[in-house]
Image (spheres, helix red, strand yellow):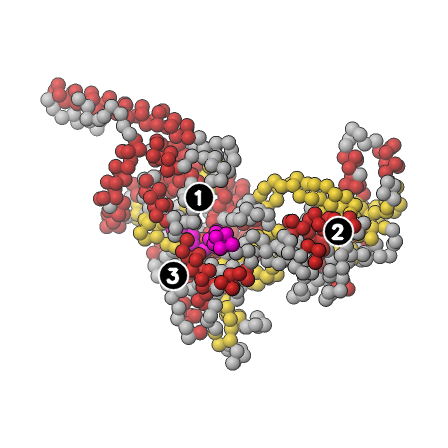
Amino acid sequence: MASLPPTLDFAKTEEEICAKWGAEDTFKKQDSLSLERGDKEYTFYDGPPFATGLPHYGHILAGTIKDVVTRYACQTGHHVSRRAGWDCHGLPVEYEIDQKLNITHRDQVLEMGVDKYNETCRGIVTRYTKEWERTVTRLGRWIDFENDYKTMDPTFMESVWWVFKELFKKDLVYQGYKVMPFSTACGTPLSNFEAGLNYKDVRDPAVVVSFPLKDEEGVSFVAWTTTPWTLPSNIALCVHPTMEYIKILDKKADKRYIVAKSRLPQLFPIMNNKKKWKPAKMADELYAIEATYQGKDLVGKKYTPLFDYFASSEGSEEYFRILSDNYVTDDAGTGIVHQAPAFGEDDYRVCLAHGVIRKGQDLPCPVDSNGMFTDTVSEVKGLHVKKADDTLIKLLKEKSRLVQKDQLDHSYPFCWRSDTPLIYKAVPSWFIKVEEIRDKIVENNKKTYWVPNQVKEGRFHSWLVDARDWAVSRNRFWGTPIPIWCSESMDEVVCIGSVDELAELSGVRVTDLHKDVVDEITIPSKKNPGTVLRRVDEVFDCWFESGSMPYAQNHYPFENKEKFENGFPADFIAEGLDQTRGWFYTLMVLSTALFDQPAFKNLICNGLVLAGDGKKMSKRLKNYPDPNVVISKYGADALRMYLINSPVVRAESLKFQESGVLGVVKEVFLPLFNAFRFFVQNMERWESNGGSKFVPSMDK
């Protein structure tokens, strides 16, 4: 009797619906009808994913949220442009090519040719776009893949140049020499927010090392460090100016040390054991205090360096002395901090303030861009810094400078792309003056509406109020080139904001803006006739490109000027919690710098989808089911409902369980289908018995 089957294959039915939508161009028709009606525009930005990998549950979750909101906007009388976008440049692509071609050093790329290297990168960036389109379409999400944007498109790259030129004109761009998080695997500095994306618990060596005083024989300062590889670059020690320091006789070792009084437990660990430590009896057995100082009393004292690698270098007459600064604490170590300005932000600042180093002067840095020791430190030449610790500790022991050796378990930043430990390294870079506009950024964040609100007012706000100047340059090849042409002495600098401007100044018109093309172009100098300006070597951080997408996807301001300005800020964006230090942040920085507005009005921030055991989903560990298999078994709607009806939409984590998707089918879809089938059966029986068509009452 019933026209509905007793059972329904939900997955197969969905496939039939998707096929019908495709055959009838349903999405396009809905879009064109909306335009014909003149529906009010509802602006949506879709953050560009990398197409070098397949979509995972995190993408499916964010895509579902985006689809739900934009469909609702359409159903309430709005037109929504839903363009797919692709992040094509940057470390993810280059790292994959480096692995494929076994490239471990920058020089290998130069030998190969930047043009060939970039062409190889270009060849993989859209490798999985068809798989993405197939999966996203199967999920029932409506999005325009035909009219997509790519960050490697010349029009997109030209708008990125325009963004940078606008910041340059506002004096928000500068070149600086700064200690930054540095990926030795990728050979490039990272921004502070990138460095915060991937922390891991690690075990590192922790050593206490002695630095004998020049003017007091038999007495040594002692400093603690968890990076022994930085010790060959030591050129100073730092104390706190008001902290109390003591000179002690270590009775067991028969050596005299200067240490912060509150940090004696570092030298005598038994003092940390409250049950075993009996100060009245044991203190006199371990040490004797021979003198007391304030930190400021020690400033200027000279010590014998650990190594002689930089003892005769330019400026070394200012090296190997005691400095003071308030950043020194007594919560760990000895209260005396070893200074290697090439590898520490505070080290660089303090040494600069005390005249140990000068701006423009080369720093003691025996480590290359791949994290390998150079010829300067012959004993560990060619070794990666993290692998050189044991050898250097052995050298310290041979020199009788090793006071203590231990291990420390702590949280440490790893490269978000290569998953290798970062180091901190002084590098020249191009910066955006975020600190100068930080208050405006914080105010613009207040104008936005977030779900959940606590992410906006908590995690994101905290990140904004402490935001540092943003290093936007990368010493890489596959990216949008930084559009600065300059003289060798940097006394003449020109920032280019368009293809037309470059053609006007150089006489060369290009259709591709990648490094291998524009690096060949020179601009005649106006200041020194007969000489030329050449482009700086760096390319943009890919986060600068994704932060520019509101403008660049429309080729603004060269095209679509009115359309963009009428729809800015966006009505809605959505991505995962990790983007509080990524896309959400770069969008807010650039929109504030350009227009003093937020880039969006409303934002939904989802949490992370984890494997069932609570760990990060890993292809290598195979600790989660293939999304396509789950969809084919239970249907996309079951997966979408499972995700959308979980704490993950409130920025909490979700431990993915396939049984949860099955639960949606059993507890929601089957009861709903059976109830509907029962209703249809009774309706058909009523029509058969009464001989008239069943018409529902609008009143009831």
Q: Quadrant of the C terminus?
A: top left
Q: Amino acid at mark 1?
A: Glu
Write down the residue under mark 3. Answer: 155
Label 1, residues with CA under 10 Å away: few <14, some 14-19, many ≥20: many
Position in image of residue 38 (x %, y %): 26, 50
The verdict on residue 145 being magenta is no
> Residue 698's quadrant in the figure?
top left
Q: Is residue 391 above or below residue 625?
A: below
Q: Residue at x 46, y 70 (%)?
A: 520
The residue mark sitting in front, 2 or 3, is 2
Q: Residue at x 39, y 68 (%)?
A: 510
Position in image of residue 629 (x %, y %): 37, 35
Question: Circle 1 — which element?
Answer: strand
Residue 89: in sight, yes or no?
yes
Write down the residue under mark 1. Answer: 575
The residue mark sitting in front, 2 or 1, is 2
Write down the residue under mark 2. Answer: 395
Label 3, residues with CA under 10 Å away: few <14, some 14-19, many ≥20: many
Label 2, residues with CA under 10 Å away: few <14, some 14-19, many ≥20: some
Number of labelled discs?
Answer: 3
Residue 603: in sight, yes or no?
no
Q: Is residue 596 above or below residue 414?
A: below
Q: Amino acid at mark 2?
A: Leu
